Image (spheres, grey):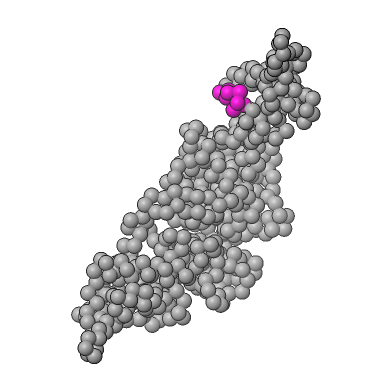
Amino acid sequence: MSDNVSFSAEVFELPTVEQRVIAGDVDTTGGEVELPGPGKPYEVAKHVMSNLYSGPSGRAQLLYWRGNWWEYTGVCWEQFAEQGKDADLPIQSDLYPLFASAVYRKVSKDVDTLVPWDPTSAKVGDVIRSLKARANKVLDDKASAPAYIGGTPGLPGDAGEYVALRNGLFRLSTRELVDHTPALFTTYSLPFDYDPGARCDEWLAFIYDTFAHDRKGAELLQEFMGYVIAGRTDLHKALLMVGPTRAGKGVILRVMTELVGQANTGSTSLDGLGTDPGQAALIGKPLATVGDAREPSRSNGRKATEFILNVVGGDSVSIQRKYQPNWTGKLPTRFVIASNELPRFVDAAGAVANRFMAVRLVKSHLGKEDPGLEGRLLAELPGIFNWALQGLDRLNETGRFTVPDTMADMVDGLEGLASPAKRFLQDMLEVTGNPNDIVPRSAVHRAWKTWHDDNGTRAASAEQMVNQLSAVDSRVECKQLPVPGAVPPPGGGRVKRDRYLVGVKLVTSNIF
């Protein structure tokens, strides 16, 4: 931060003495800045916040939100790159030179004397702790981006209406461009200028060729890209593209990454999403691209599926971070997954399949690649932005994503891969819910093992089978009941009992 204390264009107008000291514009021989004494760290923090980390308008340009430092860049708010034990280093690099040039008033025997502030690690540490408390008041930890910061924002409409671009804040509802302001807490900006007249002829030709077999797939992509740039998560959907090598999946992922910005995109794998570092890397990222959808390890696969379901579903997640407190909140992340084959998610209930909008690509350009295509497409980002806005308009009008022609079979396949129990239930059992319909658990488990052998999957134990089937349909129950026709043993005693699945019939014609 010492290299650029001008957090926004505002600061360039009237830099304070404190800002000039940090920038090196003042010959610091001591006494240039008068501060409260080291014994009053909160008062020092208040002075620093007002004179070093605020613009001429008085708006704060530094905040401490959800356990991290954030600074206003003049376009949007960005989290400090330093994390964990080094998180305070940028603040320290500002405060040490400032305090080295500062003095404070010390009264002794009615004599008022200016004394060098003389920074030490203990003094600076006290001020940083107080500064965190002060900067945390700028924005409540319970707030979610985008949000307005204190007072009158000076912008009409809701904070969620605005998208930050290089040349201003774009208001989605009116298609107007307004000046950037630190009053809008938005954590990323798109890395290009808004140009209402920009075209994307190369992109349109690419889309026409890639989706020649499924025009509705092109409409879905257009809508989903609009959904991403608008910062929306309300439809609770992710995007899945499946197709052969060189079918355009990678090109689409890279264009979406550049459209949102590399710094705003988390590129990961299914296996990585099942790990703490992989999940932590998505904090604050509006887009996550998964170009490696190979089947993860069993333990990571379960964690990855649960994480995707929670994020896409709009639920809060708790993420463990190294050297930092756990992060808890709702991620603004939209997932786009590309794969050569349908990925396998671990989800007994099969709910994950319903979180995806899916499209299959069929045309491969293997051996006929155009090496200059990607560069030409990236030159059209402002035009692609306008194209995505058209998809957003259609999405706003219909309230739902367009369903591609190739989607139904893909979702069915996802369900089968994610939840063999659901497919077994469809193939081998009739769920009636009638308590008089009972089947010995052992008989169902024999059919279960045979079915899994035939499908090349691993059969779970009888107990796990029941849990998985109940997760698919809650009417499936397992009870311990008297064996039909059993009689009490001679001399009295308990009738023989066994475990039965209740409310189901075994479709015996499907066993062989």
Q: Is residue 366 left or right of residue 491?
A: left
- In the rendered image, the quadrant that contains the N terminus is bottom left
Q: Residue at x 78, y 24 (%)?
A: 437
Q: Residue 242's x, y, as percent?
A: 58, 38
Q: Residue 298's x, y, as percent?
A: 49, 32
Q: Residue furthest top?
A: 490
Q: Is residue 409 magenta?
A: no
In this rendering, the answer to whether 415 lies above or below 384 is above
> Magenta segment, which residues?
457-465
Q: Nearer the viewer, residue 220 or 328?
A: 328
Q: Is residue 459 magenta?
A: yes
In this rendering, the answer to whether 298 lies above or below 198 is above
Q: Is residue 444 visible?
A: no
Q: Residue at x 44, y 56 (%)?
A: 263
Q: Nearer the viewer, residue 91 or 270?
A: 91
Q: Is residue 462 left or right of residue 251?
A: right
**Occupied quadrant, residue 116:** bottom left
Q: Nearer the viewer, residue 506 or 167?
A: 506
In this rendering, the answer to whether 267 lies above or below 413 is below
Q: Residue at x 56, y 35 (%)?
A: 346
